[in-house]
Image (cartoon, rainbow, N blue to C red):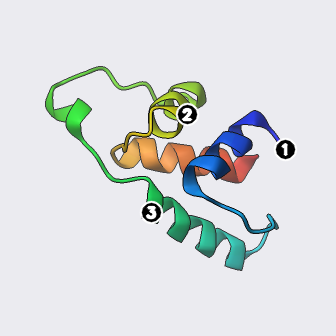
Amino acid sequence: MTPFLTEYFARTGWQQPVSVDIETLRALHLQHNSTIPFENIDVVLPREIQLDDQSLVDKLVNGRRGGYCFEQNGLLSGCCVR
């Protein structure tokens, strides 16, 4: 398992086996939305927003913050491609 997935699963509390199927995707999507809030503070302030994988992990996972749509989708997408 990659460090990205290890950190992501710890942040979301994911403890189920990982398999590539629609049921896992649905459960992962629900878990993501239940644990990482929507937040647009950086857009309102305005602050520069980085959408690369490491920046998303730093902010949403390690920083325990939420993110707006592009950040949320980028983080979940990063999980899915790994």
Q: Amino acid at mark 2?
A: Val
Q: Are marks 1 and 3 in contact (CB under 8 Å)?
A: no
Specify which label sits upstream in the sequence, 3 or 2. 3
Looking at the image, residue 21 lies above or below residue 56? below
Which residue: 64% across, 48% down?
10
- State the image coordinates of residue 12 (x, y, percent, origin top left): 56, 55
The residue drawn where x is 36% and y is 49% is: 69
Q: Amino acid at mark 1?
A: Met
The single residue placed furthest to the top in the displayed view is: 48
Question: Disc 1 or 3, which lies upstream in sequence?
Answer: 1
Residue pointed to by mark 2: 57
Q: Residues within 10 Å of mark 3 (few under 14, many from 20)?
A: some
* Quarter of the image with the N terminus in it: top right
Q: Describe residue 37's horizontal placement relative to residue 45 as left or right.
A: right
Residue 62 in percent (x, y) is at: 52, 33
Three-letter amino acid code at the position of disc 3 = Asn
- Residue located beneath label 3 in the image: 33
Residue indicated by mark 1: 1
Task: Give the residue displayed 31% in from the left and 20% down from the top.
Answer: 48
Mark 2 to mark 1 CA distance (whole Å): 16 Å
Quarter assignment of residue 3: top right
Callout 3: helix, strand or loop?
Answer: helix
Q: Establish if 44 lies above or below 39.
A: above
